[in-house]
Amino acid sequence: MSDLSPTRRQVLIAGTATLGLAAVSRWGTASASPIRDPFTLGVASGDPLPDGVVLWTRLAPDPLAADGLGGMPSTVMPVEWQVATDERFHQVVRAGAEPARPESAHTVHAEVSGLRPGAEYFYRFRVGNEISPVGRTKTAPRPGARLDKFSFAFASCQNYPDGYYTAHAHLAQEDLDLVAFLGDYIYEGSGQGGIGRGHAPAAETFTLADYRVRLAQYKGDADLRAAHAAFPWAVVFDDHEVENNWAGDISQPDTEPDQDPAVFRQRRAQAFQAYWEHMPLRRAQRPSGPDIRIFRRLTFGDLVDVHLLDTRQYRDDQVAGDARLDPSRTILGAPQREWLLRNLSGPTAQWNVLAQQVFFSQRDFTSGAADSFSDDAWDNYYAERNLVRDRLARASNPVVITGDVHANYVADVKADFEDPASATVATELVGTSISSGGDGTDQNPGDRVQLQENPHIKFVNRKRGYVRNTITREAWTADYRIVDYVSRPGAPIQDRARFVIESGRAGARQA
């Protein structure tokens, strides 16, 4: 893939300072910029296709301005972009311009096409004579084209005040084709000042301006910007991008009665608008009021299909006790469920990935004959989980990747979770948080109960980090990469565990 050493990649991610006047002259003459330092939130790319990617930036010289407008005037600003085969832009292969509009917080989503499949590219933006940092991206191979190796990482849950994004700093140094972010990109609650980060605590987010400022606060982190600039990302949201534990049109606030559904839909519309503005998403994902089509499939040659799911927007409300067994309950909604089942029934790549938010496998928290399950996970949608599981069992090499729970897990997906001797039909890999939950620990007493009550769960760890995955035609290798602390910067990275899934044999074994 890339021949960038860590040193070269650090120079790339740092920006365009090393390019100097030569970079400006290769771009052409520019008028003086009407704004200074507009690229405070960096650059990003996402959703790679065989012929292109979407490129993102936002003009925001004052990203934490309380009105959510980033210190920009209320005028349309033309933003130029370039894509090159080299990081010094000697070989520019595509170029264009996009209007950064005030009603979209002066964000840019440039959907670039006409690129070569499976190729590495570099990109940047310009407004006036201000040039953005340089980003690196890669297109997908053609569907069906033979691919012998695919490397990606997945991560989730980056609560800003809970700790530093040291894991992202290490993630930016990896050699990857993609990063999948599985939700909780921001946290909507109050007290978002951060540990030693120099920002005053903020109130809970409700308005469009609130969500814009919160997203800008998070994206201002240098380590997060570096990880975005290093690879294309594929993003989905969970609950905290809107409100903790929301379900469909149902608000789930922690400290007050549920909001009227109409009021909550207004809040959801504000949250979705700001989310789309700040993510490298295509026009197809642009929200319409409180609705957004975020579920989609990305294909990487004949090796990997990634099905990105939405387990929030269409789900029934969480219930307690045996009500979870109601066969009509849904976490996906009928259109998304039929889309997924249809995809899994048709031609697929060698490995089929469900990239989603909440724990898929059964997880009993109580010792002995009694049982208890999470109301916010697939256990609360029992019949639909089993339906999806049974379809996965007939698909080629199914692997579920999951975020949300601020812990690393590895689980065998069983044909019958009540029967440990039943066949293993798929594998679930659950990734820990980037920072949510603070420094974390290796395990807690409740984890020992989970391992005893759920023999299909093979591994639990509660440090922070991400999961690096290397997929070949023979096997999937998952490295659980952790840092020992996030309460201060600078923690080294280490591999806590490695699991291998052999092609044609469901279930993971520890290497």
Image: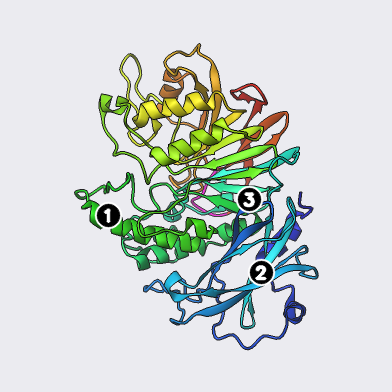
Give the label on residue 415, or none: none
Q: Secondary structure at mark 3?
A: helix
Q: Nearer the viewer, mark 3 or mark 1?
A: 1
Residue type marked 1:
Phe
Confirm whether the magenta stretch covers residue 333.
Answer: no
Q: How is the image coloured?
A: rainbow
Q: Tag 1 or tag 2, which sits nearer the N-term?
A: 2
User: Visible in this render: residue 462?
Assistant: no
Residue 336 image-quadrant placement: top left
* Badge 2 amino acid: Arg
| Residue contact between numbered discs 2 and 3, judged by CB atoms under 8 Å | no
Between disc 2 and disc 3, the foreground one is 2
Q: Residue at x 42, y 15 (%)?
A: 418
Q: Secondary structure at mark 1?
A: helix
Q: Circle 2 sits in a helix, a strand or a loop, which is it?
A: strand
Residue 398 at x, y percent in the picture = 58, 30
Q: Amino acid at mark 3?
A: His
- Of pointers 2 and 3, the one earlier in the residue sequence: 2
Q: Is residue 136 visible?
A: yes
> Where does residue 95 sit, x and y in percent of width and height?
69, 71
Which residues lie in the magenta part? 484-489
Q: Position of residue 31 (x, y in %)?
A: 64, 88
Q: CA distance from mark 2 to mark 1?
A: 38 Å
Q: Which residue was labeled with disc 1?
A: 264
Numbered mark located on residue 124 in the image: 2
